[in-house]
Image (spheres, coloured by chain):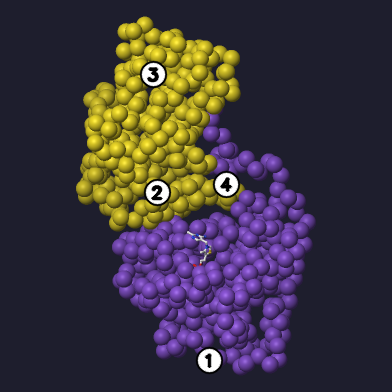
Chain colours: A yellow, B purple
Amino acid sequence: MAQLTYRDAVARAITQEMEHDPNVVFLGEDVGGAGGVFKATVGLLERFGPERVRDTPISEQAILGAAMGAAMTGLRPIAEIMFADFFAVCWDLVANQIAKSSYMTAGQVSFPLVIRSGNGGGLRFGAQHSQSVENWAMAVPGLKVVAPSNPTDVIGLFAAAVRDPDPVMFFEHKGLYSSKGEVPDGEIVDTLGSAKVLRPGGDATIVALAAMVPRAVAAAATLAERGIDAGVIDVRSLVPLDTQTILREVSATGRLFTVEENPRLCGWGAELVSIVAEECFNYLDGPPLRITTPHIPLPSADALEDMAIPSIERIVTTIERAMQS
Amino acid sequence: MTSTLDEPAAPAGPPGIDPATLHRPEGSVDVPIQLALFRQMVRMRKFETRAYDLFMENLVKGTSHLSLGQEAIAAAFGEAMEEGDYTFATYRGHAHTLARGSSMTGVMGELLGRSCGVLSGKGGSMHLTDVQRGVMGSYAIVGAHLTIALGAAWSAQYKGERRVAVAFFGDGTTNIGAFHESLNLAAVWKLPVVFVCENNMYMEYTPIGAVTAVANPAADRASAYGLDSILVDGNDADAMYLTAREALDRARNGGGPSLIEARTYRSSGHSRADPGTYRPDAEVAAWKAYDPIVLYRSRLVARGVREADLDAIEETADGDVETATVNAKASPAPGADVLMRDVWADGGSSWRN
Ligand SMILES: Cc1ncc(C[n+]2csc(CCOP(=O)(O)OP(=O)(O)O)c2C)c(N)n1
Ligand SMILES: [Mg+2]
């Protein structure tokens, strides 16, 4: 066991996988010599050399195209898109090419690749460097979508993503890079599509993702002091989605609350609510409720951004009010 | 496609192009390779002529983009490439797929949306892929596959394999960002990749000159990436073949990427049943008189190849096209079993437990 930041967990995860398989290569802007703009890839160039850790020009389409072409010819590339907002300039490669080519070719090609990216807000970067875009990816058939909330999951889920034979969008949360956690020693390999019950609860189930997970856990602690026993599930992976764990917990508590950083419309929580409504409606004691960022671009000023993204306090009051009514 | 008797004599070079600007590769092409090139072109021409007829009969649905008139380019690369090399084609990729030896029945079946299709009917005319023959896909979003070819070349370089990736694309593609990103990265990483611009003078319905800052959309951009400017007669199968060999050898031997601009013309419309009326009659006529197959046939005959041998190649191709058509028509429509398959590498499509 060691205390590790989420940021250092990224470097450890990539190191683990590059040591595990010589076909794993890594490319992106400023990832090598500079160690990444978030310092999440420090030391990799020195350790693995410029053949395996490749600095690229500002060419997001070329980065993802190169990853795709390499994956279809025997390598297991890891590509970094610095900020998830930048997916908007290379979405063709993600949504049209990487996601669809296995299906379109009747399985002639597959894409064992991982695209990792700094996702999410809270850093006062404004509307073009703060978005949570995991639901863009979730909306496209053919992509697996993962968003870890803590250093151990960064390593375990990343390893699972690299070893998976399909393309995985790996969303690291920028606001979590400096957070710390206890991480076991040795190799860590988790499984995609497994949600984690972080806290069992008798009265309500809170389902959260990435940076909303620690907030949901803190909110549950406050709610407990106020007599509401709320459980917390970390979804971890949107595709594949562990609906069984969620349906089981929600059926037991009768209440579902999602906590989503994404803007309101078509967030992952909407899909969860619809699954719960279709499949365990009779167990519900009240309407499922979504706690999200309003349907606005994210503002820059700290005062404004803090009002937009679900806070511990908003989670607590929303759930408290709903449970009282 | 039938030629008329009062056709003008074939011009000495591609219409409207100063011959002095054209790349003249060194060396000559032996007769056996010339026969192979002729056979390739004839197969492509006859296959696509049939595909057009089947489109008009509503047996080929959706869309189809023919490369009638542009065959020398795909044929030359088909002959010049080696077995392990990678082809990245566009939606106009029937010829490039056949050039690597894909079965006509598989390609025809795909156009008709039948089970025998090379993609089981899931890709269609614009996405022909035959990985076993090195056809790594046909891509329908302009420019994307140039970046994907980078990756195939990178993996060959990384693994120390002597493979080359070749990406074919049109003149219009030189104006999209992916083209420039690809050229730059290929040059910086010295990747074994050959970019082949088939300049047929139109991006869909717009003349390329009207939307491009330079006269030669690919060749004039080469210097920006430290590459040689190569403008070649894309209707001359020998010049194309020798140019392809040069670029492939260079890439295979660690010399990095090449960008080739092949001047050509599509004798049919952009897609479907487009009559191509936006093109001046004189231009169409001049290029029709510079048809790559007609030219090549007379060249081979002048070199002493017997007409009967060339006729036999044509007859065999006719037979192959007919067989492919019969097979494809007889093949059933794909069943529900393939609908939900192959989203994932395990063959499935499940997104939840
Ligand atoms: C990104 C993108 N924009 C537009 C189109 C529509 N489109 C399909 S083919 C084409 C023309 C391409 O011209 P060119 O590169 O010269 O190739 P050609 O069709 O002449 O072979 C266009 C605009 C597309 N498929 N992708
Ligand atoms: Mg064109």
At horizontal 33% and vertical 31% (from top left) the residue drawn is A308
Quarter of the image containing the C terminus of chain B? top right
Residue at disc 4, CB closer than 8 Å to ligand 1: no
Which label is found at residue A88? 2
As drawn, A66 above or below B310: above
Instruction: State the image quarter where residue A226 is shown.
Output: top left
Q: Which residue extends farthest top?
A: A227
Residue B21 location (% of width, % of height): 41, 86
Q: How crowded is mark 2: few (under 14 residues within 10 Å), some or many (20 or more)?
A: few
Q: Mark 3 points at which residue?
A: A318
CA gap, disc 3 and disc 1: 81 Å
> Which SS class for mark 1?
loop
Q: Residue B256 carries which label?
A: none
Q: Position of residue A179 (x, y in %)?
A: 25, 28
A248 up-or-down from A100: above or below = above
Disc 4 marks which residue? Answer: A103
